[in-house]
Image (cartoon, rainbow, N blue to C red):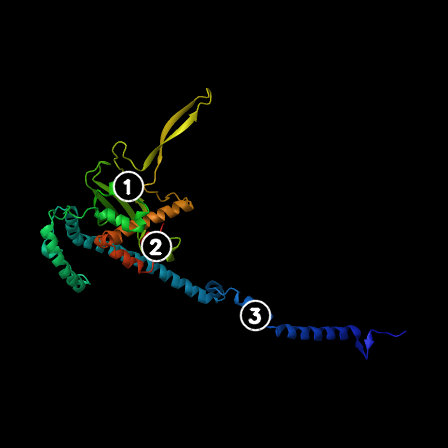
């Protein structure tokens, strides 16, 4: 009987393996020549993560040790930067005292307590020449109209509704203002920024000055923003400058029936025992700009806030920063709308001081 396990002295299973290997190689060559297969393989290779951290992990221990030394230096830099911002805060306080006489005069012009002189009122606009030519033509018409006119041009006191107009012009603020807030804001005469005293924890106070009105007895409503300029021990590399970490409002002494931050609702209540129904009234919170003075408190007990509360708090910090950095220093330009046009032409950015702790 013939033995088929050998062919010319070579085992048959070896011959079969060689044939399979040859076929596999040919099939591999065919597959690798397929553009779609090559594209899929390239995509897989491209998707293999090549992150900085994965690169760091491949470095020798001696190099990693030196990198750790660099991180220590970086932490020391963050602490120096924190001291720098503390001195910046001191400079802000110093220059705030220089600005204040100008802001006081601004208030006098707005309220009408003082009338600006002709020299103080002179302003040369960019379109001065065009306006002059138009004015020459208009003057001829005006002279004729004046001769026929019997009534004088209205001359209201100061600049009516100055701050209220700013609230209307700035989207960030107008979103907070309800229709029933408007009559109150028309009594707003000034907004001031005051910085914490030397040696005290870093903070600033917004002061809203109101003329006597029918809504509350306060002449000034305040909002205090507490700040810190110190790298976080758990994450020192996140330090980007002073941060607003909490804020306090004030009590508004509302006159009877004038509190716009609450509303009265009527609710029917059924007695469990007798089954009788009675109508009760209760007060519930109401949307209002004046809730700005009753802010949500940042969590100080280690518990994290829910997502909505974090968003509310971050928005509050951003508004406080905006009052301090933009609206108060450049109020007239927000009144005329010029600052708003400038803001629209700039890339939006999140100031470091608005970051929630």
SS at mark 1?
helix
Left or right position of 200 against 281: left
Residue 181 got which mark? Answer: 1
Residue bearing the label numbered 3: 39
| Residue 120 lies in quadrant | bottom left
Q: Which is more toward the observer, 341 or 350?
A: 341
Tell me: residue 124, above or below residue 255.
Answer: below
Left or right position of 34 against 332: right
| Residue 322 at x, y percent in the picture | 28, 52
Tell me: residue 253, above or below residue 119.
Answer: above
The residue drawn where x is 34% and y is 40% is 287
Residue 245 visible? The answer is: no
Classify mark 2: residues with Cα within 10 Å, few (<14), some (14-19) or many (20+): many
Q: Nearer the viewer, mark 1 or mark 3?
A: 1
- Mark 3 touches mark 2? (CB < 8 Å): no
| Residue 313 at x, y percent in the picture | 35, 46
Q: Decide which of tag 1 and tag 3 comes sooner along the chain.
A: 3
The residue drawn where x is 18% and y is 63% is 130
Q: Decide which of tag 2 and tag 1 comes sooner along the chain.
A: 1
């Amino acid at each position: 009987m013939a033995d088929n396990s050998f062919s010319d002295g070579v085992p048959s299973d070896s011959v079969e393996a060689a044939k399979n290997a040859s076929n596999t190689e040919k099939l591999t060559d065919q597959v690798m020549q397929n553009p779609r297969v090559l594209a899929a393989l390239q995509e897989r290779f491209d998707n293999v993560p090549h992150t900085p951290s994965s690169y760091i992990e491949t470095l020798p221990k001696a190099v990693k040790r030196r990198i750790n030394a660099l991180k220590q230096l970086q932490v020391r830099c963050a602490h120096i930067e924190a001291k720098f911002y503390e001195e910046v805060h001191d400079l802000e306080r110093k220059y705030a005292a220089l600005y204040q006489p100008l802001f006081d005069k601004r208030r006098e012009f707005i309220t009408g307590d003082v009338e600006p002189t002709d020299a103080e009122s002179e302003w040369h606009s960019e379109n001065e020449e065009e306006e002059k030519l138009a004015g020459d033509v208009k003057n001829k018409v005006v002279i004729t109209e004046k001769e026929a006119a019997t009534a004088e041009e209205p001359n209201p006191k100061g600049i009516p509704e100055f701050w209220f107009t700013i609230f209307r012009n700035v989207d960030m603020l107008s979103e907070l203002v309800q229709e029933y807030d408007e009559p109150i804001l028309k009594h707003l005469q000034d907004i001031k920024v005051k910085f914490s005293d030397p040696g005290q924890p870093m903070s600033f106070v917004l002061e809203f000055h109101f003329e006597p009105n029918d809504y509350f007895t306060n002449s000034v409503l305040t909002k205090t923003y507490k700040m810190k300029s110190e790298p976080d021990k758990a994450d020192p590399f996140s330090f980007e400058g002073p941060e607003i970490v909490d804020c306090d409002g004030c009590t508004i002494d509302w006159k009877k029936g004038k509190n716009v931050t609450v509303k009265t609702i009527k609710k029917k209540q059924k007695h469990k025992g007798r089954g009788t129904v009675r109508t009760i009234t209760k007060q519930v919170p109401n949307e209002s700009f004046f809730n700005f003075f009753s802010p949500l408190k940042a969590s100080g007990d280690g518990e994290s806030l829910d997502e909505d509360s974090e968003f509310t708090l971050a928005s509050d910090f951003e508004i406080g920063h905006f009052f301090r950095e933009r609206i108060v220093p450049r109020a007239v330009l927000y009144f005329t709308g010029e600052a708003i046009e400038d803001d629209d032409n700039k890339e939006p950015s999140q100031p470091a001081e608005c970051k929630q702790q």
